[in-house]
Image (cartoon, rainbow, N blue to C red):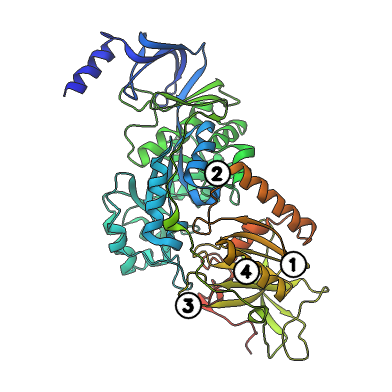
Amino acid sequence: MQKMHLRAKLARGDAPTALVLKNAKVINVFNGKITQDDIAIDGGKIIGIGNYTGEREIDLEGKFVAPGLIDAHMHMESTLVAPDQMARIIVPRGTTTVIADPHEIANVAGLAGIRYMIEASEKTALNGFFMMPSCVPATPFENSGAVLTRDSLAELIDHKMVLGLGEVMNYVGVINGDQDMIEKMELANHMIIDGHGPEISGKSLNAYVINGIRTEHECTTVAEMEERIGLGMYIAIREGSAARNLDTLIQGVNTHTKHLCMFCTDDKHPEDILREGHIDYNVRRAIELGMDPITALQLATINPARCYNLRDIGAIAPGYDADLIILDDLNSFNIVQVYKKGSLVADHKKALFDSQKVDPSSVMNTVKIKSVTPEQFRIKLNSDLVNVIHMTPESIVTNRAVRRVYLDLDGYFTPNKLLDVVKIAVIERHGNTHNIGLGLIENFNLKNGAIATTIAHDSHNIIVIGDSDSDMAVAVNELIRVQGGITIAQNGAIKATLELPIAGLMSTDSMENVSEKLSELRKIAYESLQISNKVDPFMTLSFMALPVIPELKITDQGYFDVTSFDWIGIEVEG
């Protein structure tokens, strides 16, 4: 009560506040207006907007002040760095809050992985809120490092930084009343439940949302977006690395729909963050496409705050946290400073805060298999007519193709330079089964080498592609040695490796160094392995193991046909 009396006294102007930002162009995301005012701050909170005096006063000389930006849906693991390094880069770019779904690390390390991400985020200048992963594993057609049941999630659902249930990818289970999914949704029925239901429509969509799913970040068309908004769903307009939907979906934002739209990155990689920005890029791009700057800011601030019931952030108003970004120009959206709870934490893209590192040992040493041999990648066939994964450049959607391939005298598949078909394999790395799923893939254009990575959505086993059994074994054994990462082998030797020892997903190094190593690996892939520059070799490879994206994928158990929702063999039957 005493604190409330003090705040009221300060708001009345009866005493100076700890800090006043003077002469600011204050952007009001409630009414869309911009006023020339002071912002009074005390105890990390905004006390008032108007004419105030402070113990410390900073003249902003007419610069614009907006609320800190919010990423409505993202996976921290996709930045390839630990939360402290991620915060060091994205906070100076204006992102002061993220809504994170840690299902990548949860598939590897279960609750220990989620706890690590929460604790590591709390030690930074970033608001890291979390959604409990709803689908670990993503499907029953692969082996992950953990299984999270309703009871597992109950251990963390009431954590102060947990907002609800993460993206519900098992939309078939939800629509058909799968008991496991219903139990998880009931656990979070007083919270927010995130959707992940691309292309669902009509009565199926009604069945999907009836039990509380309220957001969607998988829209790729305005029609999908409008149907979901019509049911009261919030649409997170995604602009990440692999999926870029902003240019299309921005056409669906208008006077009637804008209050249910927000921005997210979902999966954005280090090179893109460093080159383009984070949520500030979404805002900047929306403005470039003709959106009113205030509307763009609403999508990046108050809208996600309201969606996720974050009452203390997302606006500049009395009682809100003093999470602020300072801009010298609204249209170019150039952020010059960032305040977090009234403290200056970034100046001209440079972080001014130190994050306390959290020991990641609980989520390291997660590659729990012994070395492999070239012989384990041999494919014995009775017929030269085979099923092949047809990879499409700039897409994670594949097709099932039937091809005639070359066999040696003993009936083993052998690559031939006249046919762009090479081997692909998934090795279960969590130590549960020792499975190796073998298959063939075309249109990757890989020659004379192999690429392997422990980033293999969503169970994150080891996935490897190559035209040489020896190089495939060398690459996989390198990942076992370094306990996760991305590597390229050629002529029996390792060309380069990005080590990702945190769950096989994240580095302990800086984002700048990770980006530099990725660029080196990409150059080798394009120049030495002759992969087409229309293909992101590492991102594309990582999605070839995801058996919820059509049409033909591969897991540690072999080929999975997403269309028929069943296993198929390498050889064509009949």
Cα separation between marks 2 and 3: 43 Å
Circle 1 sits on which residue? Answer: 449
Q: Dot 4, crowdedness within 10 Å: few (<14), some or many (≥20)?
A: many
Q: In terms of depth relative to the viewer, which is nearer, 235 or 56?
A: 56
* Percent of width and height locating residue 548: 51, 66
Q: In terms of depth relative to the viewer, which is nearer, 393 or 491?
A: 491
Q: Please report whichever mark, 3 or 1, sits nearer to the chain's N-terminal start.
A: 3
The amino acid sitting under disc 1 is Gly
Q: Secondary structure at mark 4?
A: helix
Q: Secondary structure at mark 3?
A: loop
Foreground disc of the pair 2, 3: 3
Q: Is residue 32 above or below residue 104?
A: above
Cα separation between marks 1 and 2: 40 Å
Cα separation between marks 3 and 1: 27 Å
Q: Residue 476 has which mark?
A: 4
Cα separation between marks 1 and 4: 12 Å
